[in-house]
Structures are given as C-alpha cells and as structure tokens.
Image (tube, helix red, strand yellow):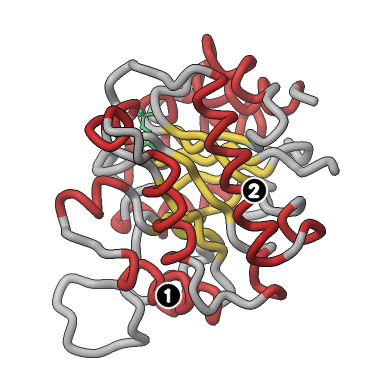
Amino acid sequence: MIRKKVIAGNWKMNKTAADGVALTKDIVAEIGRETGVDVVVCPPFTALESVAHVLEGQAIKLGAQNMHPEKNGAYTGEVSAEMLRTLYVTHVILGHSERRAYFAETDAFINKKVLSALANQLKPILCVGETLAERESGTTLAVVQRQVEGGLQGVTPEQLTSVIIAYEPVWAIGTGKVATTEQAQEVHAYIRDLLTKLYGAALAQKVRILYGGSMKPSNAVELLAQKDIDGGLIGGAALEARSFVELVKAAGAAK
Ligand code: 13P
C-alpha cells in the first residue's frame, strides 16, 4: 500500500500574520506545485486569513492548531470548526501534547473535537504520545492505545481515512532528542495494528501516521523510510522555509 506522505508544519505560538505571509511566500516559491506530498502549514489563528491568501491556487493546504467542538456560543476565546472552514482551513491539529499538558485536555474532550472537525469536513491531525516518565515505566503502548481509542470513539469507517494520526513522543518535542527509527516504527506499527483491530486491515492501511518530535532534514530520511511512518508533524524546523522545504523534498523522495 503506497500512502501519500504528509509534511505538516506546526508553527505553535510563533509568527505574526506578516511573518507568516513572508514564510509562506518563501515555501510556495520552492514547492508551491509539489503534488507528490501533502503539505500543510498550521499558523496561529491570527495568521490564518493572511496565509490563506498566499496559498490561493497552490497545492499547499492550510491547517489550524486547535478548535472548540461546539458550533458557536459562550466560549470566550474559542474558535469553531465552521469559523475555520470559512478561512479555507482544511486540516486541524487536535490533542497536541502541549494542549493536553498546559490546558488539561482529556481524551474525551479531544474526541468531541475530532467528531466536530469531521462533521465539518476538516481533517483532524490527532496527536498522541507518551511522556518520558511513561516511557521509562514501560507504559508507552498502553498510553498511545488509550489516546488513539479515546480520540477515535464514534469515528465511522467512512470518516477514518480523513483522519491523520501523529505520534509525538513528548520527550522528543522541542528537545532535539529524536526517537530512534526503531522506537518510532514500533509505535507506528502498534497504532496501525490497533486500527486494523478497530476498522479492519483495508482501512488501517490507508491511514497516514506521522512522526513528530525534533524531526529535521538530518534525521528525516531514515525516519521516512520506515514502513509505517507516513510523514512528519514538524515544529521548530517548520519555522524556516529552508528546513521545511528540505523536509518536503525528503518526503517526496522517500519510497
Ligand atoms: P519540534 O519539531 O519542535 O520538536 O516540535 C514537534 C511538534 O510538537 C509538532 O507538533
């Protein structure tokens, strides 16, 4: 099964709208017509509209970093799926470990967002991953299983192929400590086995599972060559056009 690779840039709380436009223009100049890889940029909410204008007519897709599950209402500071859709957003990162850790997001709440995103034709990038303490205590696979099963509750087989899963070991995020290819592949294969149990092999083979955590051009080639690693969710290296473009090219060259 050949799955199209995905390279998604999570800018986190970085870049003003003007900075985001400049970065996006540089990326578009290099890979605006790249169609061999699904490329997604995920700016902060405040830069979505300006970046959307730069992406008009380009193959690169626009993603948000979070959303609220409700359609509208008294949720000060929040943004709904419908609001994102009107800004030409197609993807949304959900359940990032920073939101789980700093904003106390639970699997149940993340699941509501996943269902709301899908109901509004947004593709969720569902993030899962263990902390260092969890890895050291040998509970990595159990934690990832709970997060995948919790996040996908009620997702229908028809909807599953719109979901992208990102495995991001928390200890590898922003630390420069990348998971070894064996560590990453083990968890990716485990997630695919789990999807096979939940949805059957044919669908499980179609789901893209990305790796995230200190991924950069120097380590990407080896990671992207693993059987179950279908791309990357990139933090730091997505903030500069040169490294992001290199990652896209590495994904394009990967088998
Ligand atoms: P870094 O690439 O900076 O480690 O961040 C990864 C990440 O959290 C992407 O969502």
What distance separates the C-alpha of mark 2 from that of mark 1? Answer: 27 Å
Residue lying furthest front: 138
Q: Secondary structure at mark 1?
A: helix
> Which quadrant of the structure image shows residue 158?
bottom right
Q: Residue at x 69, y 38 (%)?
A: 5
Residue lying furthest right: 1
Count all numbered tags in the image, as a single digit.
Answer: 2
Residue 81 got which mark? 1
Q: Secondary structure at mark 2?
A: helix
- Which residue type carries mark 2? Arg
Q: How many residues crowd mark 2 within 10 Å: few (<14), some (14–19), many (20+)?
A: many
Q: Residue at x 63, y 15 (%)?
A: 222
> Which quadrant of the structure image shows residue 169?
top left
- Which residue was labeled with disc 2? 192
Q: Is residue 126 left or right of residue 228?
A: left
> Which quadrant of the structure image shows residue 172?
top left
The quarter of the picture where the C terminus appears is top right
